Image (cartoon, rainbow, N blue to C red):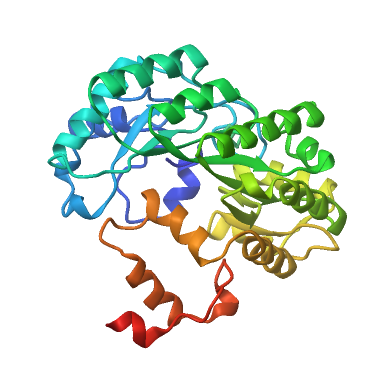
Amino acid sequence: MVGPDPQWLRGILPEANVLAPGLSEGVIERLLTESPVLSRVAEPTPGFTLNHRLVDGFRRYQPSIEASRGCGMGCVFCEERDIKVEKLGNGIALAASMARVREQYDGEEIRPYLQSSMFLPNARWAAGFAKEMHKLGLDISWRTETRVDVMKPQTLERLAWAGLRVIDLGLEAASPQQILAMKKADDPQRYLSAASDLLVACRDNGVKAKVNVLLYAGETQETLEETTAWLDDRRDAVAGVSVGPVLAYGPPKTADALIEEWRRLGARPVNKRAAASSGITAMHLSPEFPAEEAEAASLAISRHFMDQDAYFALKSFSYYPRDYSRKDFDCDVAASDPALLPFTVKDTVNFEATQG
Ligand code: SF4
């Protein structure tokens, strides 16, 4: 998925014969048959189950099942801000897809990621989906992601019944000032209250909530403290966090407007030519948070909320290869500099013991 400036990309990737921006399966088909399409397209979710067996060594990886595409909620930093959310398809078909994917893995235990930028089921849809999963005898634990203010606790409860065990929640900030600056929501109080209700529902229904936090333009010690204090107050419902400073993606044509807006919030690019040369612009977020400080603060928050058990529990669910064991992880932790890890190491891992 690339942005809408093929000419810029042509300069960066002179070896490419054809460039096709957008969500692109349809484009790929056309590339194989006729001439390329160069407009930004929003492809609908494929109406078929992906055949994981086509991937070499597919058994090492957890499968992905697409639930819906698009979002369109307008968060300024996001590529999907203006791609409209698709209506969620039929729950019965989604359950059938889960069954087909498990067949591809010969009935072995799988932990699929249900892909969807904004998973937006209502309680009725969730109940129907859960019923179908049970009818098909599918005892599958799965993971998904959504915005933190769009899913009602009753819906979450039913999804847990359908096998939801981990959810990635794009909170981004709990500072009203930063929520407004990101255009994440118009009413920060309502946003945070909905987020709080959902986190409590996750805790009460045995769903691990991994919360995404974004250090944004204009960030100050005070705004960051608001976010961490809010999360601390709900610590028993937060299984882990994923934290990082905002970056401007894309060539000057798309990044410049964003960087200009961020300048007004007190930020400035680390390298003014980065958009043209690489398409990734790191930012000094504010006088209080130059880029290096923002990186250090991100790591500190991550380490504050996670130890190695919490980190492994989240990463091993749908991300790590299926054969990457806790023993492998402990060996890698023992061989790493603890100060650079995004989690605290509770006890020193006995490397020799893990070799046995
Ligand atoms: S809610 Fe998430 S996916 Fe949607 S525009 Fe905002 S950041 Fe992007």
How many marks the image carries: the answer is 0
What residue is drawn where x is 15% and y is 35%? 103
Give x and y (percent) for residue 124.
Answer: 47, 12
Q: Is residue 99 above or below residue 217?
A: above
Does residue 52 appear left or right of residue 286 in this picture? left
User: Is residue 47 something one can see in this rendering?
Assistant: no
Give x and y (percent) for residue 239.
Answer: 56, 50
What residue is drawn where x is 62% and y is 55%? 243
Does residue 264 appear left or right of residue 296 in this picture? right
Q: To which quarter of the image does residue 14 belong?
A: bottom left
As drawn, which residue projects farthest toward the bottom? 352
Q: 296 or 158, which is in the foreground? A: 158
Does residue 64 appear left or right of residue 109 in this picture? right
Q: Which image quadrant shows ligand 1? A: top right
Give x and y (percent) for residue 22.
Answer: 43, 34
Q: Is residue 58 above or below residue 34?
A: below
User: Is residue 331 something one can see in this rendering?
Assistant: yes
What residue is drawn where x is 62% and y is 44%? 237
Q: 138 or 29, which is in the foreground? A: 138
Quarter of the image that includes the C terminus: bottom left
Q: To which quarter of the image does residue 39 belong?
A: top left
As drawn, which residue projects farthest toward the front? 204
As drawn, which residue projects farthest toward the left? 106
Q: 139 or 91, which is in the foreground? A: 139
Quarter of the image that includes the N terminus: top left
Does residue 4 appear left or right of residue 246 in this picture? left
Give x and y (percent) for residue 21.
Answer: 42, 37
Q: Is residue 338 above or below residue 94?
A: below
Q: Is residue 135 above or below residue 265?
A: above
